[in-house]
Image (tube, grey):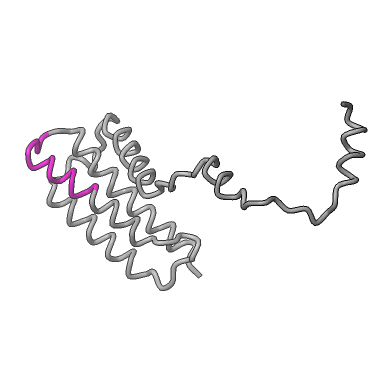
């Protein structure tokens, strides 16, 4: 049977013809079901990857500060920058959640430093996390109305 003949036969069928039973449940069972997106996991993984990349970079003069001095400077800078924020652009979504992720990463590196206080890789990673968080807050401040 060629296509023209098939088209003619289809055209002769009544338009209000309905199947004897509902076919949707059988079709729906055959459809692939999308998996839920794992954005929080992806964000955490990208943060971890960025932290690991900074782990192997050579030490900077900022690493020569004692851990306590570094922590105090970071907390002071973060507090000052957060105080300047009045309203954050909605395009950033849950920006406080992002800051909490960085804080968790900082806590984990600090815990590792309690076991290995002289490890330059951990010190570099901590300094990098501090700088990333401060840069993010600066970006929030620049785009806030």
Residue 117 falls inside the magenta stretch = yes
Q: Residue furthest bottom?
A: 86
- Magenta stretch, main secondary structure, is helix
* Quarter of image, res 49: top left
Residue 86 falls inside the magenta stretch = no
Q: Position of residue 94 (x, y in %)?
A: 39, 61
Q: Position of residue 19 (x, y in %)?
A: 70, 50
The residue range painted magenta reads 105-118
Residue drawn at (34%, 64%), measured in percent from left and top? Answer: 81
Q: Residue furthest top?
A: 1
Q: Is residue 6 left or right of residue 70?
A: right
Query: Between residues 46 and 143, which one lies in front from this camera angle?
Result: 46
Q: Residue furthest front?
A: 20
Quick one: quadrant of the N terminus?
top right
Count every numbered label the image shows and give the total. Answer: 0
Q: Position of residue 22 (x, y in %)?
A: 62, 52
Q: Position of residue 145 (x, y in %)?
A: 51, 70
Q: Is residue 44 left or right of residue 28?
A: left
Residue drawn at (33%, 52%), measured in percent from left and top? Answer: 133
Residue drawn at (58%, 44%), measured in percent from left and top? Answer: 27
In the picture shown, does residue 140 fall above or below 3? below
In the picture shown, does residue 56 fall above or below 73? above
Q: Is residue 40 left or right of residue 77?
A: right
């Amino acid at each position: 049977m060629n296509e023209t003949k098939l088209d003619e036969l289809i055209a002769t069928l009544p338009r209000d013809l309905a199947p004897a039973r509902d076919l949707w449940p059988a079709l729906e069972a055959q459809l692939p079901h999308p998996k839920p997106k794992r954005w929080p996991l992806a964000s955490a993984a990208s943060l971890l990857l960025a932290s690991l990349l900074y782990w192997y970079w050579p030490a900077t003069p900022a690493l020569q500060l004692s851990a306590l001095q570094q922590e105090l400077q970071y907390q002071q800078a973060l507090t000052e920058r957060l105080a300047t924020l009045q309203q954050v652009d909605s395009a950033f979504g849950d920006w406080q959640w992002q800051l909490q992720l960085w804080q968790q990463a900082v806590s984990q590196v600090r815990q590792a430093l309690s076991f290995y206080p002289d490890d330059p890789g951990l010190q570099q990673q901590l300094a990098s996390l501090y700088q990333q968080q401060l840069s993010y807050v600066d970006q929030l401040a620049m785009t806030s109305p």
